[in-house]
Amino acid sequence: MALFYTLAGFASTPTGSIWIAYLSNVISFIFIFYIFLSKLMKGKSKNKYIKNNFIILIIVISLSIFSTNPTTESFYRIHADYPAFIFLFLGIYINILFTENKNFYLLFLSALLMILSAWSKLPTITCLLVPILLFISLNQWKNIFYFILFIFITALITLLFCTNMYGFYDTKFILHDHITSAGWSDRNNLFDGRNGKIVFMDYFDAIPLLFRFLVMYLHEFWYLFAGCLFSLLFSFSDHCLKTSRMILRSFALTYFLVLPPCLSALAHFGGVENSLFFANTLGFLVCITLLTILLQKLKNNLLIYITLSFLAFILLLPNIRQSNSFPSSTTEAPHQQAYNYLMNGNKDVYFGWYPISHLLANSENFSCIEVPTWAGMTKPKEISFSKNHFPKGSKYLATGHTGYGSTVLEQYLGELEEVERPSELSGWRLWKILN
């Protein structure tokens, strides 16, 4: 995640940093998807202006869909989900390039990007099978051996780097111990867990629960599952050109491979809509790619243009409506408030969620309370967290407007009492440690 958002570190204020990170999300997707679509529409029209208009409309449709669906809105958030998606997205593209050029440097780079995706977000680890299944479908057995070799090499290199940076125990704890100790949410609603109960069992015993989540998923998103299944079958058809075949098959395989771990993440305690981010984002991309391929079979460019323009207009309407409710300025954004408060010489508040303001204002890097909050709910005795992790002189812990972490952290900090916040910190809630 830090690697992807490196440019955001050059900003001098939280607002600037967040804008750079946000634009990194949008621009990186537009760039990579534009390349994909250019390959899809390579022979569509000799007029680059017409082809670029088609591509722009398809990208607008994609961005509009992502912003209005609760499972894909992480696309616009500064979150570990998005770097993992982009690493995976780019890895798929480079693997397709390898099938065309047979340059093993490309295969190594594809393996590296997919490993980086798995490090960023563990559910994408199953996507390492995508190139293998693609090579099997192409009868390229030798390439399977090289890809597995490159996966082993890149996994070992990145593992050594991470353990050197964070230590072996901490790396193992966050990637394995913390996750496997989380309970399962036994419920009959895909997202609403209010009437569910937390149960503890291994993955084998959880198979019936996961099957139930699959049924609930199919009830809610049957059109994505059906679209991806049709696309996978269509990619083996003679009606699908070679380049289109590779892109469609790779996307569809990725969707089916990432769906099980996404459902598993959703079925665990704390799983919410963004648990389906990878599956549904790829599902929409598969359907959009299929639509692009089918529209190319039409001879009438004007009809294609009208169809795409109408879809783009309809899908943009909810975004226009939502934009009217957004703040017109970022000057009162919580992170900017925290930064301004610290720059005025105040040192009595620890902005634990997230402490970017401390880093930019005073060049001090502190723990984010999300880590002890989540670890405190699964393996509370395995970590230590105290006021020693706070900035010197701080009297209050600041959380977001939901007060997230204020209850769980009492096992480490003692009793917390909410106090009145100053007017310049209207985006925060302040808590005082009583013990």
Image (cartoon, grey):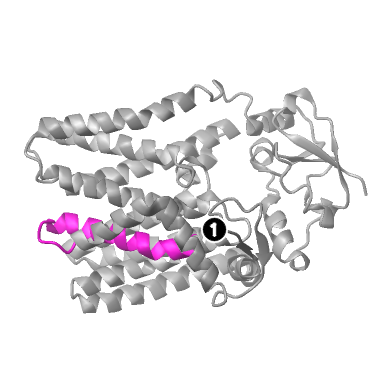
Q: Is residue 103 visible?
A: yes
Q: Residue furthest right?
A: 435
In the image: residue 349, left or right of residue 134: right
Amino acid type indicated by mark 1:
Leu
Residue at the image point whose x is 15% and y is 36% from the top: 51
Q: Which type of secondary structure does the marked residue at label 1 adopt?
A: helix
What secondary structure do most residues of the magenta stretch adopt?
A: helix
Q: Neighbour class for label 1 at 10 Å: few (<14), some, many (≥20)?
A: many
Residue at the image point whose x is 47% and y is 54% from the top: 276
Residue at the image point whose x is 62% and y is 72% from the top: 168
* Stretch in magenta: 235-262
In the image: residue 338, left or right of residue 14: right
Q: x, y (%) of residue 417?
A: 87, 41
Is 155 located above or below residue 18 in the figure? below
Q: Is residue 249 magenta-colored?
A: yes
Q: Quadrant of residue 97?
A: bottom left
Residue at the image point whose x is 28% and y is 66% from the top: 107
Is 67 located above or below residue 178 in the figure? above
Q: Is residue 311 magenta-colored?
A: no
Q: x, y (%) of residue 371?
A: 67, 55
**To which residue does mark 1 refer?**
266
Q: x, y (%) of residue 322?
A: 48, 27
- Number of labelled discs? 1
